[in-house]
Image (cartoon, grey):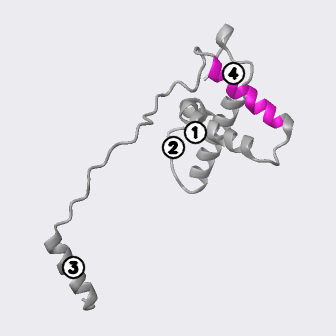
Amino acid sequence: MKLHGPTAPASSLIEQTAADLAAVYYETGRSQGLHSKYKTHKEFVAAYIENFIPLAIDTLLDILAKPETPVAQKDAISEALMERANSPKVSIFDQKYDLVEKKVGPIVIESRNTAKIFKNVARGK
């Protein structure tokens, strides 16, 4: 996932993090005996890097939230995230999320069965 030209982001921190995560995923799977149609981690990364972008963002946000993270590193992460958030052409935040809670109907318990259950529990059954 390479972007070139005027829409290319100045920072490739998110993509590099996603590529690193994908490579570790591939190598971990291979070391545990899993098979892949991809012969190298580079081929796997090229095929699946976009799938690891959300995980890369989460990872960078976790690093950003840690108080022991150096200020320079926090600045680099912030700039990379803000660049994507403010540019509609290269935005990684264009996914839509349903933030409305789904209403769950009431739980209906038949009182005749409930009384029977409580009596059995009280008797040790």
Q: CA distance from mark 4 to mark 2?
A: 35 Å
What is the span of residues highlighted in magenta in the rendered image?
Answer: 73-86
Query: On residue 117, which mark appears?
Result: 3
Q: Is residue 75 visible?
A: yes
| As drawn, 114 above or below 92 | below
**Mark 4 or mark 1: whose residue is earlier in sequence:** 1
Q: Nearer the viewer, residue 21 or 97?
A: 97
**Mark 3 or mark 2: whose residue is earlier in sequence:** 2
Q: Residue at (19%, 78%) from the top-left corner?
A: 115
Q: Is residue 2 visible?
A: no
- Between circles 4 and 2, the one closer to the viewer is 4
Q: Residue at (72%, 44%) from the top-left corner?
A: 65
Q: Residue at (49%, 28%) from the top-left corner?
A: 95
User: Which residue is label 4 attached to?
Assistant: 83
User: Which residue is label 2 attached to?
Assistant: 36
Q: As shown in the figure, which amino acid type bears the numbered disc 1?
A: Lys
